Image (tube, helix red, strand yellow):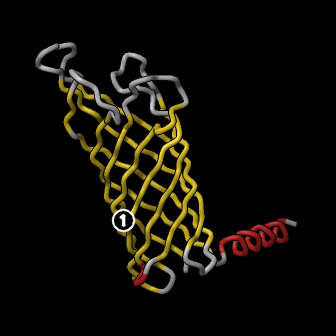
Amino acid sequence: MKSVFLTAIIFVITTFLYGQEIKVSVAPTINAGLNYQFVAGGSGQNLKAGFTASLDYLFLNDKKVNFGLGLNYHFSQVEFVPNLNTKDMLLHTENVNLISFRLKSVYKLKNLFYLSVDPSVDFHLRYDSQQTLNKQSGIGLSLGFGKNIEIKEAVFINIEPRLWIHSIIPFNEDNLQYKLTTLGLNLGLVFGK
């Protein structure tokens, strides 16, 4: 009975994975909490380092546009610098941890290059209401332009500069919301076609 069950599981998994692409990647990032509206007299920011880890699953169909799913963990730091005129805060760094679920869309270009536009649903973990940076839970977007480099049959190294903008449409109401904006270099290992 166990061997039949194990055989059935292996059959389902191999059938499900046939013709698909799985990517595991990490990205060193630089982060800022930007206001995409004009704000006079607000605090400034210094860019700080962070990282992102990703797991992507792409349904391949040999067409120009492919779709898939993605999961990201983001660790970001944002350093706030007080306005010299108002001196309304102290220099401080805030840590942000996010989980993002993405709907991937990949447009294939020539020579294994591609363009990726991924809307996401982001969840801010361990939010502290005393933070200057608003809660980042909401609908976000990430954009990437990358290349897969084949190292052996069905195994690729992936290099992809990527931009993530979180909380474009926030789940909470806030008029002047900071939007965590991250720029990184995604380095990954791809298994698939």
Q: Name the residue under label 1.
A: 160
Left or right: 69 in relation to 142: right
Quadrant that contains the C terminus: bottom right
Q: Which of 141 and 123 is in front in this view?
A: 141
Q: In which quarter of the image is residue 166?
A: top left
Q: In which quarter of the image is residue 31?
A: top left
Q: Residue furthest left?
A: 84
Q: On screen, 136 above or below 151?
A: above
Tag 1: Cα neighbours inside 10 Å, few (<14), some, or many (≥20)?
Answer: many
Q: What residue type is labelled 1?
A: Glu
Q: Which of 158 and 138 is in front in this view?
A: 138
Quadrant that contains the N terminus: bottom right
Residue 176: x percent and y percent? 39, 25
Q: Residue furthest right?
A: 1
Q: On screen, 67 above or below 143?
A: below
Residue sitting at 63 percent across and 77 percent down? 61
Left or right: 84 in relation to 7: left
Residue sitting at 58 percent across and 55 percent down? 103
Q: Which of 80 and 49 is in front in this view?
A: 80
Residue 13: x percent and y percent? 71, 69
Q: What element carries label 1?
A: strand
Q: In which quarter of the image is residue 5?
A: bottom right
Q: On screen, 53 above or below 173?
A: below
Residue sitting at 36 percent across and 53 percent down? 163
Residue 42: x percent and y percent? 24, 23
Left or right: 166 in relation to 183: right
Residue 114: x percent and y percent? 43, 72
